[in-house]
Image (cartoon, coloured by chain):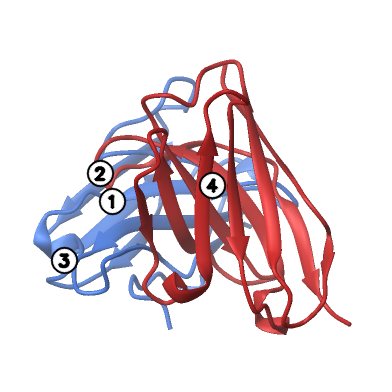
Amino acid sequence: QSVLTQPPSVSGAPGQRVTISCTGSSSNIGAGYDVHWYQQLPGTAPQLLIFGNTNRPSGVPDRFSGSKSGTSASLAITGLQAEDETTYYCQSYDSSLSAVVFGGGTKLTVL
Amino acid sequence: QVQLQESGPGLVKPSETLSLTCTVSGGSISGYYWTWIRQPAGKGLEWIGRIYSSGSTNYNPSLKSRVTMSADTSKNQFSLKLTSVTAADTAMYYCARGFGGISREFDPWGQGTLVTVSS
């Protein structure tokens, strides 16, 4: 059971908008720690997608956006493309555990 | 740009010590935090710990008793040792660069190295 809770799967049709939630608690996201998002293509290492809740590294399309509110964060993907079909992870820090924590990952299917 | 490459034995016997090295190219390890993360096949990511270039460390409390990290600025490398391994330690091991505060992001990551614990 991950400290940060993500839905195991989400889906959407090409061109649509999907969101992936990352729910934490008062000892991690709710405590003000930043949330970061990674995209992991099959057989490859995770790649940074969003950092500091809302920021995109250079090279990441603006179809990807992040937000944070209270004890949760979300990753939104607009204009879904077939190449977006993969797994996404959120990351934060938990002060009770004194550890960096990840969500369990969400598999995005493009219908 | 900065690139990371993990290296080490792909097979470790139970109760022995897992040793991995991450070689950094395209930039110096000085001034950054360097992190180890692992991922069992088909499962999620687990943070193992991090080391600053000067040698200070933060370890995941769940692994702290078995983990030692070190950094060698002359070789631009950092290393992980995990003692008393069991089958539960079988995973893909990634190294990554971190920044400043412990809640910061990791970027870039190495391609990962698969370690299997088996006799």
Q: Circle 2 — which element?
A: loop
Q: CA distance from mark 2 to mark 3?
A: 12 Å
Tell me which chain the residue with mark 3 is part of: A
Image marks 1 and 2: residues in contact by CB distance under 8 Å: yes
Using the rendered image of the protein, determine whether residue A51 is visible from the camera's viewpoint.
Answer: yes
Q: CA distance from mark 4 to mark 2?
A: 15 Å
- Residue B17 position, x and y percent, is 70, 69
- Say which residue appears at 46% left-offset and 27% top-offset: A61
Q: Which chain is blue?
A: A
Tell me which chain the residue with mark 4 is part of: A
Q: Residues within 10 Å of mark 2 (few under 14, many from 20)?
A: many
- Say which residue appears at 77% left-offset and 82% top-offset: B14
Chain B as rendered: colour: red
Where residue A35 is drawn, which disc sits there?
1
Q: Circle 1 — which element?
A: loop
Which residue is identified by label 4? A39
Q: Is residue A45 left or right of residue B62?
A: right
Where residue A73 is drawn, which disc sits there?
none
Q: Is residue A52 above or below residue B90?
A: above
Which residue is identified by label 2? A53
Q: Is residue B105 above or below residue B64?
A: above
Q: Is residue B25 left or right of residue B99?
A: right
Q: Circle 3 — which element?
A: loop
